Image (cartoon, rainbow, N blue to C red):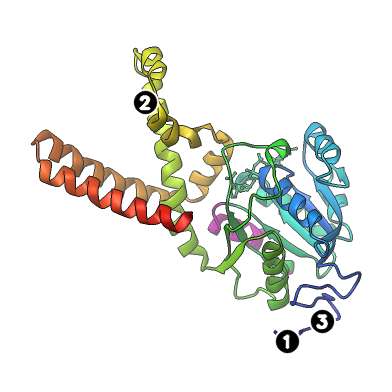
Amino acid sequence: MSSVTSSVLNYNPDGNDLVDNLLIRRLVIIGVGLIGGSLARILRKQSNGCGEIIGCGRGIVNLQTAVELGVIDRYTTDIAEAVTDADMIVVAVPLGAMAKTFAAMLPNLAPHAIVTDVGSAKSSVVADARAQLAAHLPYFVPGHPIAGTEKSGVTASFAELFQKRRVILTPLPETDPLAHAKVKKMWQLAGAEVIDMEVVHHDEVLAATSHLPHVLAYSLVDTLVKMEERAEIFRFSAGGFRDFSRIASSDPQMWHDICVANRKAVLYMIDLFNHQLQEFRVALEHEDSKTILEIFTRAKVTRDKLQEKLE
Ligand code: NAP
């Protein structure tokens, strides 16, 4: 690959910053939780990853823990102070907090500092960025790592989280190609495969593969909780229930924000699923074994193939 250099970004897309051989000189992570903490951990491990890592959040306890765990070098609870003189800022807060985070950083952003996010829905983040970071839009690169667990906070973070996982970037027409390349390289250093996708398409795809499953897991557990016999039901729950309901342990505020932010696409998927469930219900009511077996077999074949690819 040929080297493209820019005196402004001081960047070489082959992976080496021209200063100290580092991709990122000063990295700021706003929201040092599962995703932000995991990214900091892996970039720190890479010799050409980043120099200093500054954490920013609302709560001192989590940030202090992040320092003690060696995830960040230092922290501040002041967003404007955090971003001063940074060359890469990763915003890893819940979707509902993106707009005010962008607004708070704007006054102190260096002219060519790159801002990226990890939000699970992209249309809302892009709208927030357009409203709050308009002057800085070429240096904003929306992103979403397709990796996570049901746990939250820096204590849940681990360096291998993005290994062999995908990260979707949804660059805008205004996005500076060098800023895009640098964010791409950052995720590649984290071990991920990076794919570009159009914003609305991202939200439709993720509504189907991630947002609907979370709605179903939460709804299943909530349905059982409301049953009088719940104590007995949960006492006899086994592997199937555990597998299906694991993601209902995810942070409620985070998933509230995701569903609200991606409301249209999630509603579409709920309607589609309702239709499918109704089809199954009718088949069962009429003891239509052919249809029941067709549905189960089609799903099993698809799931088995998917599993092979994931292994
Ligand atoms: P997390 O572990 O709860 O971390 C979020 C961090 O943001 C916390 O450390 C918290 O620190 C800070 N924060 C929380 N609420 C805030 C608010 N209202 N204003 C400012 N800061 C706030 O969550 P996460 O799983 O890393 O998720 C972070 C982002 O990644 C979300 O946008 C989510 O959509 C996206 N994401 C999550 C997953 C997943 O599976 N978990 C996967 C891909 C993408 P303080 O409390 O100290 O402020």
Label 1 residue near ligand 1, CB within 8 Å: no
Q: Report the disc number at residue 223.
A: 2
Q: Within 10 angstroms of label 2, few (less than 14), some, or many (20 or more) residues?
A: few
Residue drawn where x is 53% and y is 32% of the image: 249
Residue type, numbered disc 3: Ser
Q: Is residue 19 left or right of residue 89?
A: right
Front-most of 197 and 264? Answer: 197
Dominant secondary structure of the residues highlighted in magenta in the image: helix
Q: Is residue 66 left or right of residue 289?
A: right
Give whichever of discs 3 and 2 has the lower sequence position: 3
- Residue 65 at what x, y percent from top left? 81, 35
Q: Secondary structure at mark 1?
A: loop
Residue drawn where x is 68% and y is 71% of the image: 180
Residue type, numbered disc 2: Thr
Seen in the picture, residue 248 relative to 227 is either above or below; the reply is below
**Magenta residues, start to end:** 120-135
Tags 3 and 1 in contact by the CB under 8 Å rule?
A: no
Q: Which residue is mark 3?
A: 6
Residue drawn where x is 58% and y is 51% of the image: 147
Q: Which residue is mark 1?
A: 2
